[in-house]
Image (tube, rainbow, N blue to C red):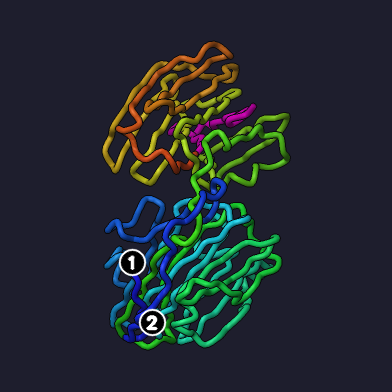
């Protein structure tokens, strides 16, 4: 939908996405986060957050836009409502863009890339409409926290600032704007960004502050990266780690601080408490495989879990508890598959767990001490959720006895 609203004023012309987006970009790029919000509801690629008494509620799709609104209650603290990509994307050699359809004089419209923590705090670079001005900014880390550097501020022009884009070039970031013709030009530049551009989260938000006048209003966003070549998720086998480095590879993120890991000789040992890592980005299981090599495990009454997750209520989970291996498959909050088999595991048992999709079937199998794999669960791809963007999660957890659990992995999709 192509309408521009600025403080109650509608502008007749606005940016139109070109017909046809050309050839696909390399896999895993930020241009793969695309949404024209015409489906009537937010897709699985998004998560929402709301914090504030004057915020109407979470973002919603209204008239083909991502809509965020506030009401007349005065803002007594910094408040935010946001739409955030569920998974991280690779910005290197790529870009991400948005069309801010409606801006408001008493609420910030914000478009950001952030480090893959997914929090509203941390390293970030962004653009925002604030009080009639367009601003570009970057957060950096120092011992006192994350101070903000204002990179550029100019009067907001509803004709020349109809689309915002963040683009990586030669290791730096170009923050750009486009007019009705779609011709981008530089607004600000970050020559040496401090966040890891291989795994960034994209966020759209409305922010309110106590200094802003109470009232009612809203902001709207549309056409996320719809003018960029689409980028599929990388195949699941690209998530490959032999654990040969001195630290966890860059594409993992830790879920818990109650965790001790030791990397040594091509293996990682996780000791918990509770310890979990997830892939920062999502991967495509279609015609692909996830193979997890378990060198040994000492669980007591604890557990090991490998999960492939599309969203919170759609996942495939393999869980070892004691001598039993349990499998659960959920789609939109409904169980669509389950199995349980005997699978003794101990400190001297090496296993490889495989989750594989081929020709419309998903199969889970285990190979013990190098023997031929044994299939223990199959399900049609159609009965499951969309397998094209899945996050991988590895976890080990102590049981009720409190006896420490330990898991040693020798590889994930390792050669």
Mark sitting on residue 104: 2
Q: Point out residue 318 in the picture as x, y percentages from the top left corner.
A: 43, 29
**Neighbour tally class for label 2: few under 14, some 14-19, many 20 plus, Cα within 10 Å:** many
Distance (Cα) linking label 2 and label 1 = 15 Å
Q: Is residue 11 above or below residue 48?
A: below
172 on left or right of 82:
right
Q: Helix or strand or loop: what does disc 1 sit on? A: strand
Q: Point out residue 306 in the picture as x, y percentages from the top left corner.
A: 47, 33
The total number of labels drawn is 2
Precedes in sequence: disc 2 or disc 1: 1
Q: Helix or strand or loop: what does disc 2 sit on? A: loop
The magenta stretch spans residue 404: yes
Q: Residue at x 62, y 55 (%)?
A: 92
Quarter of the image holding residue 38? bottom left
Depth check, front residue: 174 or 353: 174
Residue range (magenta):
393-415
Mark sitting on residue 65: 1
Q: Is residue 408 above or below residue 344?
A: below
Q: Point out residue 74 in the picture as x, y percentages from the top left corner.
A: 34, 83
The magenta stretch spans residue 263: no
Q: Is residue 305 above or below residue 173?
A: above
């Amino acid at each position: 939908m192509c309408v521009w609203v600025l403080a109650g004023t509608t502008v007749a012309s606005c940016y139109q996405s070109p017909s046809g987006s050309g050839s696909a970009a390399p896999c895993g790029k930020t241009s793969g986060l695309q949404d024209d919000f015409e489906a009537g509801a937010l897709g699985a690629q998004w998560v929402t957050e709301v914090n504030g008494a004057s915020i109407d509620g979470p973002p919603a799709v209204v008239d083909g836009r991502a809509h965020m609104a506030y009401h007349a209650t005065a803002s007594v603290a910094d408040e935010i409502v946001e739409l955030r990509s569920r998974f991280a994307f690779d910005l290197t050699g790529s870009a991400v863009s948005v069309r801010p359809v409606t801006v408001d004089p008493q609420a910030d419209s914000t478009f950001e890339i952030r480090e893959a923590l997914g929090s509203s705090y941390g390293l970030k670079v962004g653009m925002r409409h604030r009080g009639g001005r367009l601003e570009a900014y970057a957060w950096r880390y120092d011992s006192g926290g994350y101070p903000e550097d204002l990179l550029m501020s100019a009067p907001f022009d509803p004709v020349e600032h109809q689309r915002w884009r963040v683009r990586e070039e030669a290791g730096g970031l170009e923050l750009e704007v486009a007019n009705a013709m779609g011709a981008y030009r530089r607004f600000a530049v970050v020559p040496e960004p401090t966040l890891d551009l291989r795994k960034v989260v994209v966020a759209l938000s409305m922010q309110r502050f106590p200094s802003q006048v109470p009232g009612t209003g809203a902001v709207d966003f549309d056409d996320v990266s719809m003018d960029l070549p689409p980028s599929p998720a990388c195949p699941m086998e690209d998530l490959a780690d032999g654990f040969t480095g001195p630290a966890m590879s860059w594409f993992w993120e830790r879920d818990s601080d109650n965790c001790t890991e030791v990397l040594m000789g091509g293996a990682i040992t996780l000791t918990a408490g509770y310890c979990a890592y997830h892939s920062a980005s999502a991967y495509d299981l279609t015609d692909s495989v996830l193979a997890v090599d378990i060198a040994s495990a000492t669980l007591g009454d604890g557990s090991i879990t490998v999960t492939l997750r599309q969203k919170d209520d759609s996942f495939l989970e393999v869980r070892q508890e004691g001598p039993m291996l349990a499998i659960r498959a959920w789609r939109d909050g409904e169980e669509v598959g389950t199995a349980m088999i005997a699978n003794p595991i101990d400190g001297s048992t090496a296993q490889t767990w495989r989750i594989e999709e081929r020709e419309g079937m998903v199969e889970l199998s285990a190979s013990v001490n190098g023997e031929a794999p044994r299939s223990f669960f199959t399900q049609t791809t159609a009965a499951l959720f969309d397998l094209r963007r899945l996050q991988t999660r590895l976890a080990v957890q102590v049981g009720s006895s409190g006896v420490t659990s330990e898991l040693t992995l020798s590889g994930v999709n390792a050669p």
